[in-house]
Image (cartoon, helix red, strand yellow):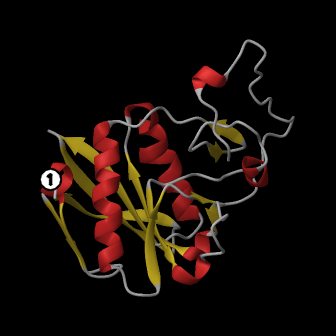
């Protein structure tokens, strides 16, 4: 996806007009001048508002913490889309993916089978998508683990979910304040109070 700054838009700029049946997951890589982190949900383009400081800090905490703790066949990466089907390509804030799913530096998406964990940091403009729509789609695609992160007094609170394969729905496994310590999908220990800690 290419990005264009507001200052580069002139009076003649036209936003993309959807085709009759909506956009497809493959269109996302071909459409020019999309804002960064554009997602496709049910065939519609979803433009993301600027990140808050909290949102950015949480991603900066979780990605390296996970990368340092994942087994060697997995990797942690942020802000890559998952092609869930023809009309859905959401972008979790952080993902844990198979190392062998890396197709090179031009890669823009992963298959659901390559994803172990999705993490969404809830933003004001995306509450319904982050709490309801995207987790439901990740579960239907068979992604085994999902975390939702919310802000409470400046600190992250992590809601942990695991897929029930019989219902293809997530089951709550716990709510974590201050410290996130888990044994699945692999041993994880993250100090959530370090969200604003500098080196």
The outermost residue toward the bottom is 72
- What is the secondary structure assignment of the residue under circle 1? loop
Residue at image mark 1: 197
Please tell me whether residue 161 is drawn above or below residue 20 in the rendered image.
below
Task: Give how far across and how far down residue 79 sits, in percent.
Answer: 50, 55
The image quadrant of residue 137 is bottom right
Task: Give how far across and how far down residue 156 sits, in percent.
Answer: 22, 50
The outermost residue toward the top is 11
Residue 160 shows up from this direction: no
Q: Is residue 88 left or right of residue 56?
A: right
The outermost residue toward the right is 20
Q: Give the number of marks.
A: 1
Q: Is residue 152 left or right of residue 107?
A: left
How packed mark 1 is, by other alpha carbons closer than 10 Å (few <14, some 14-19, many 20 or more), is few
Please tell me whether residue 81 is drawn above or below residue 180 in the rendered image.
above
The image quadrant of residue 63 is bottom left
Residue in the picture at 30% in, 38% down: 53
Q: Is residue 14 left or right of residue 127?
A: right
Q: Quadrant of the C terminus?
A: bottom left
Q: Nearer the viewer, residue 2 or 125?
A: 2
Residue 46 shows up from this direction: yes
Residue in the picture at 51% in, 68% down: 167
Task: Give how far across and how far down residue 198 sits, in percent.
Answer: 16, 53
The image quadrant of residue 193 is bottom left
Task: Give how far across and how far down residue 151 sits, in percent.
Answer: 24, 42
Q: Nearer the viewer, residue 163 or 57?
A: 57
């Amino acid at each position: 996806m290419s990005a264009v700054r507001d200052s580069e838009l002139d009076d003649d700029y036209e936003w993309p007009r959807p085709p009759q049946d909506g956009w497809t997951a493959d269109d996302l890589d071909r459409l020019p001048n999309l804002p960064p982190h554009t997602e496709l949900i049910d065939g519609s383009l979803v433009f993301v508002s600027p990140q808050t400081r909290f949102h950015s800090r949480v991603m900066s905490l979780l990605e390296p913490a996970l990368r340092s703790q994942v087994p060697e066949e997995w990797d942690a990466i942020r802000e890559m889309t998952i092609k869930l089907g023809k009309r859905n390509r959401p972008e979790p804030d952080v993902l844990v993916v198979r190392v062998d799913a890396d197709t090179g530096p031009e890669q823009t998406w992963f298959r659901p089978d390559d994803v172990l964990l999705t993490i969404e940091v809830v933003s004001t403009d995306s509450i319904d998508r982050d709490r309801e729509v995207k987790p439901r789609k990740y579960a239907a695609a068979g992604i085994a683990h999902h975390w939702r992160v919310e802000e409470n007094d400046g600190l992250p609170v992590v809601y942990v979910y695991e897929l029930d394969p019989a219902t293809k729905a997530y089951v709550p496994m716990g709510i974590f304040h201050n410290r996130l310590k888990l044994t699945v999908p692999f041993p994880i220990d993250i100090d959530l109070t370090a969200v604003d800690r500098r080196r």
